[in-house]
Image: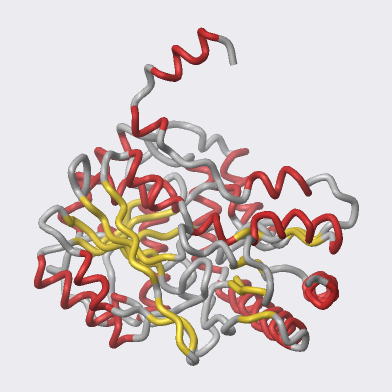
Amino acid sequence: MNGVGITLIQNLRGEALAAPESGIVAVVNYGRERPGLIPLWAGEGDLPTPPFIADAASRALAAGETFYTWQKGIPDLRQALARYYQRHFGREFASDDFIVTGSGMHAIQLAIDAVAGKGDDVIYLTPAWPNFAAAAGIGGARAVPVSLQQSGNGWFCDVERIAAAVTPATRAIFINSPSNPTGWTADRETLQAILDLARSKGLWIIADEIYSLFYYDGPRAPSFLDIAADEDRILFVNSFSKNWAMTGWRVGWVKAHPSLQPVFENLIQYSTSGVAQFMQRGAVVALDSGDAFIAEQVERARQARNLVCGILAETGRARFTAPQGAFYLFFTIDGIEQSKSAAFDIIDQANVGLAPGTAFGDGWERYFRLCFHRRLDQVEEAAHRLARWITAAR
């Protein structure tokens, strides 16, 4: 980089300069063009958006729905969100409970912007998808990690550790359940303990329940919606990406008390100014006609989880807990201390792409994340390749 470039960079805002690079990108760039590589590093499935959704967006585009639209989302989509929640959560909701955003990441950014800024702390559980902590930092807040714990029964959240991290600067607690990358899923008692803590300290909860239907012990994961009252300070952030194979669409939503809607509408005005109307038409159809598609994907993910866990367990060297939810396996391999360097070896020798644990926070250097949300034959082949590498590696 020349002197001009260095000078320009040095004059950028400190929070922007401090934004971390993705811990996965280097591995992806290294293996992206490998013939026959099976990529299990990204958090998405292998299916394109189904035609019944894409066709609805295409029809709206052809019909000229390309103008400015409601900042908070078209009424039809917010009404469809209310119907979706009624079906899956068994409660009545109004369209004014929902604000459409330009992706789940945008929903998270808006939630942070609404409750925390410079001088504030936000607590989150690790290992974690890194975007929340990075988004908080860019906004000027300090992200405070609290580690999930492990026992013979798998991952669990010690709420007392969250309580110990609370200070006068704490403004919010971010809870992702089911979790990326561990698959940990909070039970009702844990959610109640977190909510009681937030109530007693006057804290916000930002609840990321994007994987609530990718749950293997029932129709959906436990939710703060099962226990929350109207006056609770909870912002729910979500996305169309996972349930309906719409990762590239960048459409999400916030569920919040209707009194907060004007604030979020303003935040959208000054960030994206709204989501394209023709894409929202596709999202309406996804919500109203996509339950069968979701059920098929969850069942496929269940089978893929069982395949991967069974094959890796046979090596005797892979250590993991079968995930309760989401579609990731977070695991270690006996004798491997640095997953980042090992991930490159696995590409070279097994032709499988994994995400290193370093991408999910400090202290997880020995771990790998494997996304098993793919065709079963590919998952099985990748697991066998990885098992052979594990058996040979010393």
Q: Residue at x 70, y 48 (%)?
A: 28
Name the spot of residue 148 as percent of width and height, x first: 40, 74
Name the spot of residue 305 as percent of width and height, x first: 67, 80
Left or right, 120 with respect to 255, comes to left
Quarter holding residue 71: top left
Left or right, 259 with respect to 109, comes to left
Name the spot of residue 81 as percent of width and height, x first: 39, 63
Q: What colouring method underlies this structural image?
A: secondary structure
Please tell me whether residue 70 is drawn above or below residue 204 in the rendered image. above
Name the spot of residue 95 as percent of width and height, x first: 30, 60
| Outermost residue toward the right in this view | 35
Q: Residue at x 25, y 70 (%)?
A: 162
Quarter occupied by the C terminus: bottom right
In depth, the one of 276 and 208 nearer the eye is 208
| Outermost residue toward the top in this view | 4
- Residue 236 visible? The answer is no
- Residue 263 visible? The answer is yes
Left or right, 73 with respect to 259, comes to right
In depth, the one of 222 and 363 nearer the eye is 363
Q: How many numbered marks does the figure carry?
A: 0
Please tell me whether residue 279 is drawn above or below residue 204 in the rendered image. above
Please tell me whether residue 385 is drawn above or below residue 270 in the rendered image. below
Quarter occupied by the N terminus: top right
Q: Residue at x 59, y 55 (%)?
A: 246
Quarter holding residue 377: bottom right
Q: Residue at x 64, y 61 (%)?
A: 339
